[in-house]
Image (cartoon, rainbow, N blue to C red):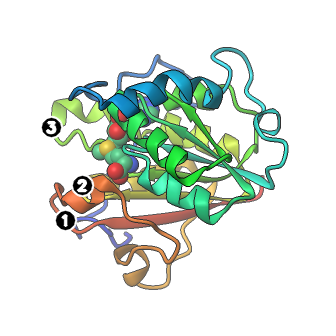
Amino acid sequence: MAASPGSGRIWWTPCAGWPDPRVEAPPPLRSFGRIRSRTLKPRQASLLDTLLPSLRPPAEGPVDPAGLWPAAAETWLEVGFGGGEHMAAQAARHPDVLILGAEPFVNGVASALRHVDDLGLSNVRIHDGDVRDLMSRLPDASLRRMFVLFPDPWPKLRHHKRRLLSPAFVAEAARLLGPAGRLRLATDWAAYADVMLAVVLADGRFDWPVQCAADWREPPADHSPTRYEAKRLGDCAPVWLDFIRRPA
Ligand SMILES: C[S@@+](CC[C@H](N)C(=O)[O-])C[C@H]1O[C@@H](n2cnc3c(N)ncnc32)[C@H](O)[C@@H]1O
């Protein structure tokens, strides 16, 4: 039995009732809530019309990161970037890295575009939709890093099936991350932290190289705070789970 970084409770069995992603591929349920809220500010609305079209990966067919930005030393993916603060901060810090971001929430996309525009970032591309559509069109081992920071917790039992972190999602992340590729998950919901850890380890293709509790309790040194994280809406302090993809 292993220690639990979230609730401290006994390990939850991750896959009960879940289909094996390598055998079945049911259509994914919607994992996000509303896709639009308050009225957009004029500048944000304008950026959706002028900047977003130039940052979108192709809407259909295979997506080759090298074709999106040939100068890239490597490609990272941020899943559900919310307002885009973290994505923009990482892109500014790593100008040689192509950062793909996916987010269906229009107000979040508009906010991210403002960051991209303000910082003059040329290394960000935005898929304004479900990340699973983008992931399915990326080649094997095409990503070096993936971030899934504070995914929607769907805390009610009847909504758990909407959670993004499922065996199928982790299997797809394992396909996309090359050897030694890194997957970072974060949540401030204790039970979800337990599920995340269990589901990723159950996949069998990731190592979780932790030495002590500080490794999941302290924000990683290269983390940049997100808007959702600052709200502290969960039932525990943020839990940080950094995994490394094993060689095939
Ligand atoms: C709780 S918010 C956190 C946002 C951001 N990561 C942060 O920490 O501020 C979760 C985000 O994931 C997005 N999301 C949910 N399902 C998604 C999916 N299938 N593809 C892309 N984004 C998704 C939601 O729209 C929402 O903006």
Q: Earlier in the sequence, mark 1 or mark 3?
A: 3
Q: Secondary structure at mark 2?
A: helix
Residue underneath mark 3: 156
Front residue of 145/246: it is 145
Q: Is residue 101 above or below residue 61?
A: below
Question: For this view, does 208 lie left or right of residue 84?
Answer: right
Query: Mark 3: which amino acid?
Result: Lys
Residue underneath mark 2: 191
What separation in Å lies between label 1 and label 3 (alpha carbons)? 16 Å
Q: Is residue 229 above or below residue 102?
A: below
Front residue of 73/176: it is 73
Task: State which mark lies toward you, 1 or 3.
Answer: 1
Determine if residue 48 is in view: yes
Determine if residue 201 is in view: no
Query: Mark 1: which amino acid?
Result: Cys
Front residue of 130/213: it is 130
Front residue of 65/201: it is 65
- Could you classify mark 1 by the number of other residues whose Cα lies within 10 Å: few (under 14), some (14-19), or many (20 or more)? some
- Could you classify mark 3 by the number of other residues whose Cα lies within 10 Å: few (under 14), some (14-19), or many (20 or more)? few
Q: Is residue 158 above or below residue 150?
A: above
Name the residue located 53 percent from the left edge and 21 percent from the top edge. Answer: 25
Dot 2 beta carbon under 8 Å from ligand 1: no
C-beta proximity under 8 Å, tags 3 and 2:
no
Dot 3 beta carbon under 8 Å from ligand 1: no
Q: Position of residue 167 (x, y in %)?
A: 48, 39
Task: State which mark lies toward you, 1 or 2.
Answer: 1
Q: Quadrant of ligand 1?
A: top left
Question: For this view, does 230 lie left or right of residue 171?
Answer: left
Query: Mark 2: which amino acid?
Result: Ala
What separation in Å lies between label 1 and label 2 (alpha carbons)? 9 Å
Dot 1 beta carbon under 8 Å from ligand 1: no
Residue underneath mark 1: 236
